[in-house]
Image (spheres, grey):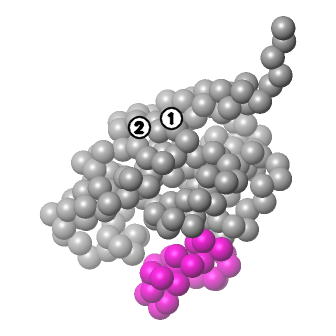
């Protein structure tokens, strides 16, 4: 089984995914790290030299390279499910969880990290908040197509992981034969 974690940048997909993989014994894949390893450059470098379209193509290739044999937790990039082909791929090859966080809370998270994010670097405070609100509103229709949504604003990683584990247990219970 593949479980894709989707949501806006900064919502914790990578850190939660790693810890979730440790708890479940599943493999862990992070599409952003996969792109960086394949390209031999960081995401900001890819954006600067090749542009967003090239990055998105690499991101799609990384997503499709993950084997659906065995169990894997996949942390996707924030824009991954916004490509209809990627969204269809994830629906066909696994289950997904949307880690939902409000724009204002994301602002608090991304405020000090913006220089490491190519789309946020150079934005002032007002521009940052506007970007988050606008982009989250644009992406929400894609994110909400996930198999499950967990409202995570202000939640601890443990809370989020426990809820995802509950969801995984529900999925595996549905696959177990019932006794009569």
Quadrant, the C terminus: top right
Q: Is residue 175 above or below residue 126?
A: above
Q: Residues within 10 Å of mark 2 (few under 14, many from 20)?
A: some
The span from disc 1 to disc 2 (Cα, nearest Å) is 7 Å
Residue at the top extreme? 180
| Residue 110 image-quadrant placement | bottom left
Which secondary structure is most common in the magenta stretch?
helix
Which of the two residues, 150 or 104, is positioned nearer the viewer here?
150
| Image position, residue 17 (x, y; %) | 60, 47
| Residue 153 image-quadrant placement | top left
Which residue in the structure is indicated by mark 2?
A: 152
Question: What residue is drawn where x is 55% and y is 59%?
Answer: 87
Report the magenta residues as a range.
35-61
Residue 164 seen: yes
| Image position, residue 164 (x, y; %) | 58, 34
Residue 59 magenta: yes
Quadrant, the N terminus: top right
Marking on residue 160: 1
Residue 98 magenta: no
| Image position, residue 4 (x, y; %) | 61, 50
Residue at the left extreme? 126
How many marks are shown on the rendered structure?
2
Q: 151 left or right of 165? A: left
Question: What residue is drawn where x is 45% and y is 86%?
Answer: 51
Q: Residues within 10 Å of mark 1 (few under 14, many from 20)?
A: some
The reply to whether the C-beta atoms of the residues labelled 1 and 2 are less than 8 Å apart is yes
Residue 74 seen: no
Question: What residue is drawn where x is 49% and y is 90%?
Answer: 50
Q: 52 left or right of 90? A: left
């Amino acid at each position: 089984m593949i479980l894709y974690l989707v949501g806006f940048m900064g919502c914790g997909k990578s850190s939660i995914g790693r810890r979730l993989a440790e708890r479940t014994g599943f493999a862990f894949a992070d599409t952003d790290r996969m792109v960086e390893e394949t390209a031999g450059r960081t995401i900001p470098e890819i954006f600067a030299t090749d542009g967003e379209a090239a990055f998105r193509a690499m991101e799609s290739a990384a997503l499709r390279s993950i084997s659906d044999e065995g169990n894997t937790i996949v942390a996707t990039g924030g824009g991954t499910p916004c490509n209809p082909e990627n969204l269809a791929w994830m629906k066909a090859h696994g289950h997904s969880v949307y880690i939902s966080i409000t724009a204002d809370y994301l602002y608090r998270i991304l405020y000090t990290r913006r220089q490491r994010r190519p789309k946020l670097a150079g934005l002032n405070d007002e521009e940052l908040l506007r970007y988050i609100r606008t982009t989250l509103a644009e992406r929400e229709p894609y994110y909400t197509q996930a198999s499950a949504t967990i409202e995570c604003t202000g939640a601890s990683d443990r809370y989020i992981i426990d809820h995802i584990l509950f969801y995984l247990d529900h999925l595996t219970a549905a696959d177990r034969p019932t006794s009569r």
